[in-house]
Image (cartoon, rainbow, N blue to C red):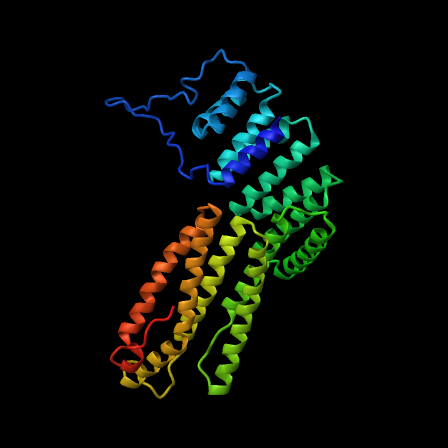
Amino acid sequence: MRGVVAVGLLLLLVLGACQTSRVALAPEVVRGNPKPASVDPFAGIDPSLSPEDLFERGVDDYNGGRHDAALRYFDALIARYPEAPQVSDAAYNAGLILQRRNRHEEALTRFRRVVERAAAPRDRLDARFRMLACLDVLERFDDSLALIAEIRRRHASVSEEDRLELAAREGVARFHLGETATAEDLLQQTFHDYQIGLRRGDVVNEVPGALAAYTLGLIGRARFDELPIPYAEKETMLAHLNTKAQALLAAQDWFLRAIEQDNATFSTASGYQIAQLYRDFNLSIQAVELPPEFAPDSDEARMYRCMLAEQVRPLLRKAMRLFDRTVEMGERLRVRNRWTEQSRNELDAVEKLYLEQIRACRDVLPEKSSEPDNR
């Protein structure tokens, strides 16, 4: 029954049924008493309810949109009947709710309970994969590698989808631990195998491909960030700009591939990253040193900066369009996450920067400032 319930919970959560706010569990303090009063987290839940009743009420509350109550019933079952056969089901479903609420440390404890209690190897494998996702968000990449090794040791035979997801998550961990070359080779091979699996019909889960492509985009983004644009003679400067532009396009290509996999999380994250690439390219060009013959506060320096800003302003317009589209993508997919929120904030910041640049150069380049904005 857990598999059906878990899938149903996950589907409803992805569609936006789960709220992201946390439940305040701080104990109330009695005035005049220096010690906080103890609070029973299961107050109001009939202590005589059986494990079956607690589990069924948890499922009913969740399906009715009462997710806080559902979590309390699942946790009450785990606390009161730790040896009951329903514990692994309750722990898995509680873990899903907590994971979707970004309470990943708490979710980890529930999924560990599944590993300890579940009878079926597939249930333990599912819980371990959920743990991997939590560890990635928590940036505990050493723990991720250890868990990947444990999965491979304890589950010798896994599906092609599971093999690909393990490879993708290993690539993620190795990239963040500084093993960029190893990670890049592993992720490129994973994405290649994923595409073959799609064509053969061995793979229907988009997560391995989206995760691999997104992380390859991050690797490209890191290379883009590391490329300087020092002041130089015209031809040398153009060569530096071209190299950085090529790095931008290489990273963008992987982010676009991640978007093509139709995963809400990685699509919105990739849209945000592409917009940042264009914004940062604009800023890095504007930060180029002045020609040595210009004094920093001279009219010549101001003219130089404004002419440069005018030339690269289309990059800001592109960034604004991409941040806006990322917000729209989240609304269309009915997902609200850190990427859609950051895109909304960045859109406001870039629009402000765009207008500040125009105002600062209005007197310097009056004929340009009067042109219509064709964003």
The residue lying toward the viewer, choosing from 165 and 287, is 165
Q: Is residue 345 visible?
A: yes
Residue at horizontal 61 percent and vertical 28 percent from the top: 2
Report the quarter where the N terminus lies.
top right
**Res 39 quadrant in image:** top left
Q: Is residue 106 visible?
A: no
Residue 253 in the image: above or below residue 135 = below
Residue at horizontal 51 percent and vertical 57 percent from the top: 270
Residue 294 in the image: above or below residue 144 = below
Residue at horizontal 38 percent and vertical 79 percent from the top: 308
**Res 180 quadrant in image:** bottom right
The residue lying toward the viewer, choosing from 19 and 152, is 19
Residue 93 in the image: above or below residue 260 = above
Residue extending furthest toward the top: 48
User: Where in the figure is residue 149, as x and y percent of width and height?
Assistant: 68, 44
User: Is residue 321 rendered to the left or right of residue 249?
Assistant: left
Residue extending furthest toward the right: 157
User: Is residue 355 rendered to the left or right of residue 144?
Assistant: left
Residue 284 in the image: above or below residue 87 = below
User: Is residue 83 rendered to the left or right of residue 30?
Assistant: right
User: Where in the figure is residue 89, as x and y percent of width and height?
Assistant: 59, 26
